[in-house]
Amino acid sequence: MQIKDVTNYIEQLAPLSYAEDFDNVGLLIGNYTTKVTGVLVTLDTLEETVDEAIANNCNLIVSFHPIVFSGLKKINGNNYVERVVLKAIQHNIAIYATHTALDNVNNGVSAKMGEVLGLENMKTLIPKKGIIKKLTTYVPFAEATNLREKLFEAGAGSIGNYDNCSFNVEGKGSYRGNENSNPTVGKKGKLMFEEETCITVTFDSYLEGKILSALFKNHPYEEVAYEVITLDNQNQHIGMGMIGELSSPMNEKDFLLFVKETFKTGCVRHSELLDKPIKKVAVLGGSGSFAIKNALRAGADAYISADFKYHEFFKAEKNILLTDVGHYESEQFTKNLLVDYLNKNFSTFAIILSEKSTNPIYYI
C-alpha cells in the first residue's frame, strides 16, 4: 500500500474540498507514492509524536490538526513547528492532516461528540453552502439513458437519502460543424437539428473531476455542450456542529457533571444556570464561539464547545447553557474515529492510536 491509498480512503470520509478556506489540510510532508509501513493516528503532531511513530515503525502520521498552518519562511528548528518538520523529514515520515474537512462531515468530529454523549436524532447545526454543484448537458435522445446511468455511477444525482436523481427535458438542438469538424450525426457545413434530452443533475463539489470524466467519456458528440454551476443551497448533511437530544431530560447540575465525566476534563466553564431541564444539546469540536447564535436559533438548551472568551458567555442571554469543556477535550475522540475508520479497510500494516496526550493545558 502507498500513502495515496490511505489518504484517498480518508478523503472518502472527509473530502479536502469540505475544509474551510483558511485551513491547511492534506499531505503536508512526504510523497504520495511512498509505501506505508504503519500509520500513527494523533490529534496533534509534536516532536514526541514523531518519536512515537519512529518507535512503532510508522512512516505516516495522520493528524487532526495541521502542524504547518501558515507559511514557513525558514526551517531551522527554532520553534516546535520547525523541529517537528525537520525530524519528520530526517526520518522519512509523512504527515497528513484532516482538520476542518473532518469537522464538516456529518459523521465527523462533532458527530463523535454527540455519540459519546448519547445524543439522538442528530442533525447538522450549520449546514455548509457552496459545495453543491449542478451539471446540465444535452445528449441525443437515444443516448440519454446510458449517459444518465454513467453520471449516476460517478456519484451524480445523490440528494440526502435519495440517489439517481435527475431532471430531464426533451427538445431539439441545432448545430453546424466547420471544415475541421467531425460530427457524430450529420455532415460538416450543414445545419443539423437533433432530438435531444437535456439532463440536469446535482453533485458534491469534490466529485466534479469524476463527473466530468464520465460525461466526456460517454457523451457521443465531438464537442460536448454542458454547464456546471455552483449552487447557493445549503447541504443539510455537511457542515459544522451537530444538534440532537438526550434520551431523557437532565437537570443542569447533573448535566454538567455528566459532561465533565464524559469528556474527562479537569474543568467545565459554563454560563449562568437557568433552572430548566436540558434535553436538546448542540455540540461543536474545537473553538466554537462563532456558533453560539446558531445553537440559540436551533433551540438548544445547552451548547458544548470550547475556547469561549469572557464576553461570549454573555451571549447566553438567559436562553441557553453555554458549556466550555476545553479544546483538546472536545476533540479527543477524533483519534478513535479515524482509527476505527482506517481499520475497516487496511490490515496489511498497523493502524496505531497515539498514546500520547498532546493537550498543552493543565488544571490544578
Image: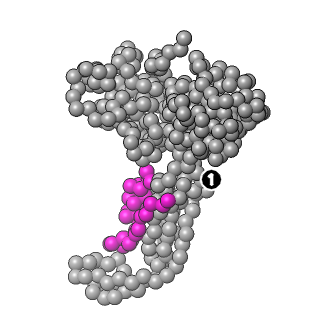
Vertical relation: 8 (above or below) 346: below
Q: Amino acid at mark 1?
A: Asn
The answer to whether any part of residue 283 appears in the image is no
Q: Is residue 362 above or below residue 75?
A: above
Q: Camera-side residue: 253 or 94?
A: 253
Residue situated furthest bottom in the rendering:
190
Residue 243 painted magenta: no
Compared to residue 142, the image places residue 38 above or below, namely: above
- The verdict on residue 228 being magenta is yes
Q: Residue placed at 29% from the left, 81% from the top?
A: 177
Q: Residue 180's quadrant in the figure? A: bottom left
Relative depth, front residue between 66 and 314:
314
Residue occupied by mark 1: 161
Q: Nearer the viewer, residue 183 or 209?
A: 209
Highlighted range, magenta: 204-232
Whole-percent x, y for residue 42 in the image: 45, 25
Mark count: 1
